Amino acid sequence: MKRILLLILPLTVLSSFVLTGCNNKDNSSYKNLEERVKQLEQQVAILNKTLTEQSAEHSDADISTEHFVDTSDSTSNNLTADTMQSLTKAVDEVTAKADSATPNGNIEEKRAQFFNLKDELDLTDQRLDSYDDYIESQYKQGQLSYEDYRSQEQILENLEDKLDASEDKLERTFGIDD
């Protein structure tokens, strides 16, 4: 019986040391997890701030489109202030800006830069869509010949292709596949 007690006592002491050692490892793991959670919370805060800023810019962009479409016409037809020349110029400007963009800053700044440029491309695409709706309405009302309508449709398609190509290049440049 003494032998069993002598065997149990050292095993108990040894077990307590082993379990204490495991407990220290768990504590360090726990501390590492806490640090990682804090880092992730900081990243979330930074992303929320960036999204808030982008949302504010996007709201400003939505407000700035009001001068492109006049919906006050009582016949419910949209009249656009854009012309094919103003749209061509807008596409040329925004694609030149996007095509010449180079990512700089930290990851969040690069993302913000990418999405700001993408929003500009999207806004210009919306202008093209509005003008497309306008000329389609003009054609249906008989105010635009079929030849003129098809000609303008082709120009709009080319401008949209140019925007798409610029967006693809922007995604490659920034390494973001949106």
Image: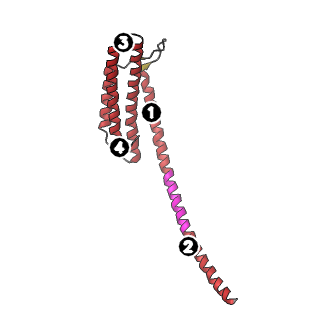
Q: Position of residue 177 (x, y in %)?
A: 39, 42
Q: Quadrant of residue 53?
A: top left
Give the mark nearest the N terminus, 1 or 3.
Answer: 1
The kind of residue on which mark 3 rests is Leu
C-alpha separation, residue under disc 2 versus residue under disc 1: 55 Å
- Please name the predominant secondary structure of the magenta segment in the image: helix
- 10 Å crowding of disc 2: few (<14), some (14-19), many (20+): few
Give the mark nearest the N terminus, 2 or 4.
Answer: 2
- 10 Å crowding of disc 1: few (<14), some (14-19), many (20+): some
Residue drawn at the location 37% of the way across and 32% of the way down: 121
Q: Answer above or below: position of 59 versus 32.
A: above
Instruction: In this rendered view, identify the residue nearer to me: 141 or 97.
Output: 141
C-alpha separation, residue under disc 3 versus residue under disc 2: 85 Å
C-alpha separation, residue under disc 4 versus residue under disc 1: 20 Å
Give the mark nearest the N terminus, 2 or 1.
Answer: 2
The kind of residue on which mark 4 rests is Phe
Query: In the rendered image, which residue does mark 3 sit on?
Result: 144
Marks 3/4 in contact by CB < 8 Å: the verdict is no
**Residue 32: mark:** none
Query: In the rendered image, which residue does mark 2 sit on?
Result: 21
3 part of magenta stretch: no
Residue drawn at the location 34% of the way across and 18% of the way down: 150
Q: Position of residue 169 (x, y in %)?
A: 32, 38
Query: In the rendered image, which residue does mark 4 sit on?
Result: 174
Quarter of the picture holding the N terminus: bottom right
Instruction: In this rendered view, identify the residue nearer to me: 77 or 115.
Output: 77
Q: Is residue 94 left or right of residue 56?
A: left
Numbered range of the magenta stretch? 25-40
Query: In the rendered image, which residue does mark 1 sit on?
Result: 58
